[in-house]
Image (tube, helix red, strand yellow):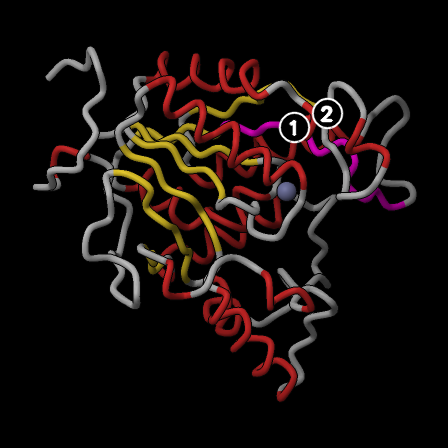
């Protein structure tokens, strides 16, 4: 069994982007570790949500613990940075936030976790963090640096299939599916389909994924694009998760040829380009 570490920016990202994959790996008996960079302190907060003395970071930490349990994660921890808020806002430039974190220092924190776990796999985000949020871009930078430092043999970038999102947007426009403005940025969301190496069919775990999204009640309302759809539509929209394999080198993948799940054992691939972790036993 392998140890698969997912590195995310804020509480709820894990459920939305990789929840089905996490649940499927956990069900297969792999050790699933969830590292979240921030507590999402700058998320939206509706009036009357928080109790006296409670911060949004407190609430979202509780929600994340619940979501991680739903997904079957064996360990859930924070990297210890603060939410940067949206690009261009003052919050994204202040010290202590993840977007301005020193790359070496942040990568060192994550690498220490990867070492401690002897992680076989690390999952980060694509180069622009899926949609450009400064904390998501930083997940990519920090994650890649940490994987190099720890010698993690298998690295994936979670992303979205832009072609799928564009198609979804046009289908939504023709139907009564209320997407709000969630798909406005589909033209730049994720990566072109040709770049995707891995598409996980998570339809057997969509109800688990939906339950994990629901655990983030402060951020994902029942009337939101994420949850306000009947089960069959939910399965269509959320029944697959996309990744780009960084290493071992994805020979023969891409351009429409996709593997159906994460490789969790680099040694199982008969590839010359495989990476061997230094000092690894067995
Ligand atoms: Zn996020």
| Magenta highlight on residue 41 | yes
Q: Residue at x 65, y 28 (%)?
A: 38
Residue 206 appears left or right of 16? left
Residue most extreme to the left: 270
Look at mark 2 in the image and give the residue it sits on. 97
Rendering coords of residue 257 (x, y %): 25, 64
| Magenta highlight on residue 37 | yes
Magenta stretch secondary structure, dominant: loop
User: Regarding ligand 1, which quadrant of the image does it lie in?
Assistant: top right
Please tell me which residue lies in front, 105 or 207.
105
Location of the C terminus (image quadrant): top left
Q: Residue at x 53, y 54 (%)?
A: 210
Q: Does residue 193 lie above or below 17 as drawn?
A: below
Residue 202 found in image quarter: bottom left
- Is disc 1 placed on a helix, strand or loop? strand
Q: Are marks 1 and 2 in contact (CB under 8 Å)?
A: yes
Look at mark 1 in the image and give the residue it sits on. 38
**Magenta residues, as a range?**
35-46
Q: Residue at x 65, y 78 (%)?
A: 177
Location of the N terminus (image quadrant): top left
- Specify few, some or many for label 1: CA neighbours under 10 Å numbering under 14, 14-19, or 20 or more: many
Rendering coords of residue 201 (x, y %): 34, 60
Q: Does residue 278 lie above or below 74 as drawn?
A: above
Q: Residue at x 42, y 56 (%)?
A: 241
- The numbered dot on residue 199 is none
Rendering coords of residue 250 (x, y %): 24, 48
Please tell me which residue lies in front, 197 or 220.
197
Q: Does residue 35 lie above or below 156 as drawn?
A: above
């Amino acid at each position: 069994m392998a140890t698969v570490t997912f590195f995310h920016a804020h509480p709820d990202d894990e459920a939305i982007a990789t929840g089905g994959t996490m649940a499927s790996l956990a069900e297969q008996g792999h050790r699933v570790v969830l590292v979240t960079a921030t507590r999402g302190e700058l998320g939206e907060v509706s009036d009357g949500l928080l109790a006296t003395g409670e911060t949004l970071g407190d609430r979202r930490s509780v929600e994340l613990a619940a979501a991680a349990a739903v997904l079957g994660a064996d360990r859930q921890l924070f990297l210890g940075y603060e939410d940067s808020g949206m690009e261009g806002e003052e919050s994204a430039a202040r010290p202590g936030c993840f977007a301005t974190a020193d790359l070496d220092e942040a990568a060192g924190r994550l690498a220490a976790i990867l070492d401690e776990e002897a992680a076989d796999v690390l999952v980060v985000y694509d180069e622009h963090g899926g949609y450009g949020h400064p904390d998501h871009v930083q997940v990519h930078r920090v994650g890649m640096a940490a994987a190099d430092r720890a010698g993690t043999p298998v690295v994936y970038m979670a992303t979205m299939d832009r072609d799928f999102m564009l198609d979804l947007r046009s289908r939504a426009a023709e139907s009564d599916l209320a997407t709000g403005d969630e798909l406005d940025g589909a033209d730049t969301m994720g990566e072109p389909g040709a770049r995707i190496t891995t598409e996980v069919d998570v339809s057997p775990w969509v109800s688990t994924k939906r339950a994990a999204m629901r655990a983030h009640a402060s951020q994902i309302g029942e009337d939101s694009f994420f949850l306000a759809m009947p089960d069959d539509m939910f399965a269509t929209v959320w029944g697959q998760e996309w990744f780009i394999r960084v290493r071992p080198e994805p020979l023969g993948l891409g351009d429409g040829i996709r593997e159906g799940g994460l490789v969790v054992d680099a040694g199982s691939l008969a590839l010359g380009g495989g990476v061997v972790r230094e000092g690894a036993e067995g």
